[in-house]
Amino acid sequence: MDINTIPVISVSYNSAELIEDLLGSFRAHYSNPVTIIDGSSEQHYRAIEAVCARYADVRFIHFDYNIHHGPGMAWAFQNLGLHGRVLVLDSDIQVIRGGFLEDMAARLQPGMYGVGYVNHVNEGGFDVKYEEGAVRYLHPACMLLNIEVVREWPLPTKHGAPMTEAMLALRRAGRSDLVQGIDWLRNDFLAIETNQPRLYLRHDWQGTVKRSGSYNLEEWSAAAQAAAEIRLSVMAMLPPTARSIVELGANDGMLATSCVQADPQRRYVHAGSHPDNAALAADPDTLDDGFFRDHADADCWILDQALERSADPLQLLKNIRKVIKADASIIVVMPNAQHWSMQLRLAVGDLKYADHGLLSSGQRHWFSRGSLLNLLREAGYQMEQGVPLIRQPLTNPLLEATWKQLFSALGADPVLAFQDSQPDTYVLKARLAG
């Protein structure tokens, strides 16, 4: 393949200046066909479209919403009829001199996933300094891909690190060797920190954020950190000798991976409803007696947002109790319906359903700390350990004082009731009673 026929993909958002710099610097050295996948707002996309029109063989595809970096790449990989090698560049890349694409093409061998800047992240996609146990991450700021191989693995997602799912899948399959890092690219990307001269490319990190204000991924970041906190809390409660674990519920698979990596001899079974992804759903209410009998040897049962999504949470707990070993335990992850934000919503009638949380469509039951403990006792369990996860505490003194007055007027302990309104999630460990 002629080096100048390799198609180039870039995702843009609200910055005509960045696209001007990218296309101008790239066209000074290469004539490759370029496609800009754009998710800019109405006041910005016309200017970006005008920039693209000034350059030959540049295709502009606009979406009437912020498609985000990961989904934008995924759309291009699936819909543009791409084949062979494909170059992906961030919108804030500037080409200093030619030769970089030739070098990357020489390194990308048939059957490889891609080459580029490789750093290391944890399973949540956050950068880490360590390499042992970390995930090798091919950064989408500049990567040359074999697109047919890319399509065999999970596509980029809406995520602060959109290649995380693909890189995790490669690692789990033992095929991280399909990704190769390039030293000069790493040096070029880190030059802003090291003050070393750049060889081919300039990339001042988060250029889009500096121009447009945000990646609009705050929700993802908060959710990823919350999931990591829950995952660590659950793992801390696992019996150290647990060799067989059954998870019913909502986790995204990272808990299973972490548990097995901590002890490769473990057997880990996952079945249950996923709150945000119907494709991962398997209603725990449909599990028959045979399923529970088949896993009677489990040392721990994890119920991650399963009870409140079950039609009959008491029966689900009893089904486990029929087969659970005397020395086994259950770990329950439960959103707190008594959280102050939920009480405030009820007080003002703001009960708008959402895609996640206590007002998601999959939510069938609400539990407070007290009602959860009552449910466990009724099912024949007793709590052994509990952790309240507080991520959004109430910090308004006036509201706090008002709430405590209300609790006192209702005959409740104002201090205890206020404390119970602070956690947004409980992680509890329980065993058979008596």
Image (cartoon, rainbow, N blue to C red):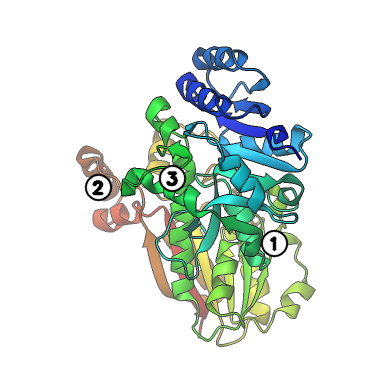
Relative to residue 354, is residue 402 drawn left or right? left
Q: Mark 3 or mark 1, which is nearer the start of the sequence?
A: 3
Q: Nearer the viewer, residue 355 or 153?
A: 153
Q: Nearer the viewer, residue 80 or 84?
A: 84
Q: Position of residue 378 (x, y in %)?
A: 55, 70
User: From this viewpoint, is residue 33 visible?
Assistant: yes
The residues bearing labels 2 and 3 have C-alpha atoms spaced at a distance of: 57 Å
Relative to residue 64, is residue 366 drawn left or right? left
Q: Residue at x 55, y 29 (%)?
A: 26
Q: Nearer the viewer, mark 2 or mark 3?
A: 3
Mark 1 crowd level (few <14, some 14–19, many ≥20, 10 Å Cα):
some
At label 2, the amino acid type is Lys
Q: Which residue corresponds to mark 3?
A: 188
Q: Position of residue 401 (x, y in %)?
A: 21, 43
Q: Nearer the viewer, mark 2 or mark 1?
A: 1
User: From this viewpoint, is residue 361 visible?
Assistant: no
Q: Residue at x 71, y 60 (%)?
A: 285
The residues bearing labels 1 and 3 have C-alpha atoms spaced at a distance of: 50 Å
* Location of residue 161 with respect to 311 vertically, above or below: above
At label 3, the amino acid type is Asp
Mark 2 crowd level (few <14, some 14–19, many ≥20, 10 Å Cα):
some
Mark 3 crowd level (few <14, some 14–19, many ≥20, 10 Å Cα):
many
Q: Residue at x 39, y 48 (%)?
A: 190
What numbered label is drawn on residue 404?
2
Q: Residue at x 66, y 59 (%)?
A: 178
Quadrant location of residue 212?
top left
Q: Nearer the viewer, residue 287 or 46?
A: 46
Q: Which residue corresponds to mark 1?
A: 284
Q: Nearer the viewer, residue 278 or 147?
A: 147
At label 1, the amino acid type is Pro
Are the two marked residues, 1 and 3, in contact with CB atoms closer than 8 angstroms? no
Relative to residue 122, is residue 278 drawn left or right? right
